[in-house]
Amino acid sequence: MTIIHNDAQVVRELTATYAEIRRQPRMWRETAAALRARRDEMSAFLAPRLADPSLRIVLAGAGTSAFAGDVIAPALRSALGRRVDAVATTDIVASPAAVFAEDLPTLLISFARSGNSPESTAATELANQFLTEVSHVVITCDLEGELAHAHADAPTSLVVGMPEETNDSGFAMTSSFTSMVLACLLLFEGERNGIVDALSGEAERLFALDEQIGALLDRRIERVVYLGAGSLTGLAQESALKLLELTAGTVVGLFDSPLGFRHGPKAVVDDATLIVVYRSDDAYTAQYDDDIVTELQGIAPGRVVRIGGAGYGSPTDYPLPAIDGLPDAYRGLVAVVFAQLLALHASVKAGCTPDNPFPGGTVNRVVQGVTVYPHPRSEDARA
């Protein structure tokens, strides 16, 4: 798509990316309804596997889909009281012997917008090769993709399709990311009363602050740092990637944890840096979030944004009152809307086309140019 308008609001409304960001509340409701309709089938698949106390759950994907696992893993470890690891498919494909060093019963959960990235099917094939007992859950936005087709009829696989509209046509993953995260949480934890409506309502409230969010870029901003702990570290990484993607790298996105940021990375803060802190709902963890906000406000006044919490009277605080008390993995679905809108504003300000920030094809919507090499270890060589 070629942008011919200079007005930022007109540009946003002309882009598929903006529409995909805005329709997330509806996608969440449709995702919840889809899982509700298959609850018995999904429970029958999961129950015997979860009954094994030695089961290892691995959450896998590439890029944004990998960060979905990073957001979910801490929440599932807490909810299920068992081992849950987030491992990128790119790490599985590059070093399968290291990822699957322990031959444990494994449930591999693969996240994929299209399922056509080379690593998607390769990761599941390597799991089958290295592990004696492995089952698969494929959470995908494209039931016609290669990954979904590879597992559609397998007795040890469960394919969970997202609403068709979550298969974002824009370059950056937005509704696909949040819908897949929500689907996985609901798959294992069930649907709490009113949770999806609460998330949707709070996201709509953030949409109403769109111009206020864009105004954070009125001064010169060359980099944005996102900070978060636990599930919110993965969310910070996804937020940084959105900025890099939609601005074609002209605005740098960085991420860290609030405590980790002090150990060297804080050196990046200067007059052209904006810092966004995702505040945990856990009262203990939030102490560290608030400490780093206070410290950074002394270094970068007016350029420190806090997402979540009750609000502290600062114009750069964005409380999320309707979802206070929810685990951070759920609250992150709303918090990342802030990052998506900020990245969209930054994209327009940088003169990029949000739906295709890389018209020369140097970076693609579905990764290209990856050669997947056969691994020398065969099934017969399994220890």
Image (tube, rainbow, N blue to C red):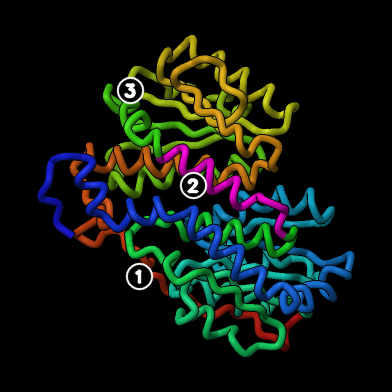
- Cα separation, mark 2 vs mark 1, equals 23 Å
* Label 1 to label 3: alpha-carbon separation: 35 Å
Q: Quadrant of residue 233?
A: top right
> 231 or 4, which lies in front?
4
Residue in the image at 65% along x and 68% along y: 109
Mark 2 secondary-structure assignment = helix
Local crowd size for mark 3, using a 10 Å CA cut-off: few (<14), some (14–19), many (≥20): some
Magenta residues, start to end: 191-207
- Tell me the quarter of the image containing the C terminus: bottom right
Indicate the position of residue 172 as horizontal and vertical percent values: 37, 55
Residue at figure coordinates x 44%, y 18% from the top left: 315
Residue type at numbered disc 3: Ala
Q: Is residue 149 visible?
A: yes
Q: Residues within 10 Å of mark 2 (few under 14, many from 20)?
A: many
Please report whichever mark, 1 or 3, sits nearer to the chain's N-terminal start: 3
* Lower position in the chain sequence, tag 2 or tag 1: 2
Q: Residues within 10 Å of mark 1 (few under 14, many from 20)?
A: few
Give the residue at mark 1: 369
Disc 3 designates what residue? 272
Mark 1 secondary-structure assignment:
loop
Q: Are marks 2 and 1 in contact (CB under 8 Å)?
A: no
Residue behind mark 2:
238
Position of residue 144 relative to residue 181, above or below, is below
Residue type at numbered disc 1: Gly
Residue 45, x across and y down, in percent: 76, 78
Which quadrant is home to the N terminus?
Answer: bottom left
The amino acid pointed to by label 2 is Glu
Taking the spot 78% from the left edge, 80% from the top edge, the residue there is 132
Q: Nearer the viewer, mark 1 or mark 3?
A: 3
